[in-house]
Amino acid sequence: WARLDDVPFSKLRGGQPRLLPFLVAANPVNYGKASKLSCVEAIAATLMIVGLPQRAEQLLSKFTWGLNFLRLNAELFEAYVDCEDSAAVVAAQDRLMAQWQVERDAPTYELPPSGSEDSGEESGDEGA
């Protein structure tokens, strides 16, 4: 660390970028934030996507919030695990995002009261 300034970062070559598809963090620092995974979440996500869910659970079980990561992203993992290659993963991600956008933009309807609030008036206590 003492010589960090001497490292020529601009000349270092990286390999292929390693990207995970859309996932939501469950760690306490970034809970609910898209694509802000901790290292353990990223490793567990990779294990889930390549079909090793028991290993992912084993890894995440060491953290109090760990298994919530799997629950929070269950629908996504179900879609990603069936993909044959990265193009299929991106297509699954795009399909889910489009589906969620449609659901979010769907009109909401105001429902009439259920009547449970009025039930006390009909019990015969009106004359008291």
Image (cartoon, rainbow, N blue to C red):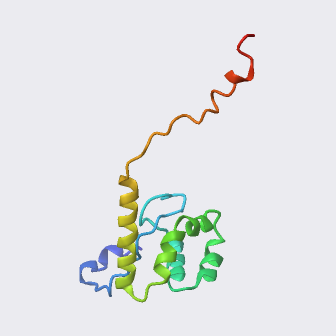
User: Could you say where residue 50 lies in the image, as x and y percent from the top left?
Assistant: 51, 86
Q: Which residue sits at x=44%, y=59%?
A: 33
Q: Above or below — where is 117 with respect to 94?
A: above
Q: Is residue 14 visible?
A: yes
Q: Which residue sits at x=68%, y=21%?
A: 121
Q: Nearer the viewer, residue 19 or 84?
A: 84
Q: Quadrant of the C terminus?
A: top right
Q: Nearer the viewer, residue 64 or 124?
A: 124
Q: Within the image, what quadrant is residue 1 found in?
A: bottom left
Q: Which residue sits at x=69%, y=23%?
A: 122
Q: Residue furthest left?
A: 10
Q: Above or below — where is 70 with respect to 82?
A: above
In the image, taking residue 6 as reference, residue 120 lies left or right, namely right
Q: Tally the marks.
A: 0
In the image, taking residue 61 as reference, residue 28 lies left or right, namely left
Q: Nearer the viewer, residue 114 or 5?
A: 114
Q: Nearer the viewer, residue 116 or 29?
A: 116
Q: Is residue 19 visible?
A: no
In the image, taking residue 45 as reference, residue 106 lies left or right, namely left
User: Could you say where residue 83 lies in the image, as x and y percent from the top left?
Assistant: 44, 85
Q: Which residue sits at x=36%, y=59%?
A: 102
User: Could you say where residue 34 lies in the image, as x and y percent from the top left?
Assistant: 42, 63
In the image, taking residue 4 as reference, residue 43 lies left or right, namely right
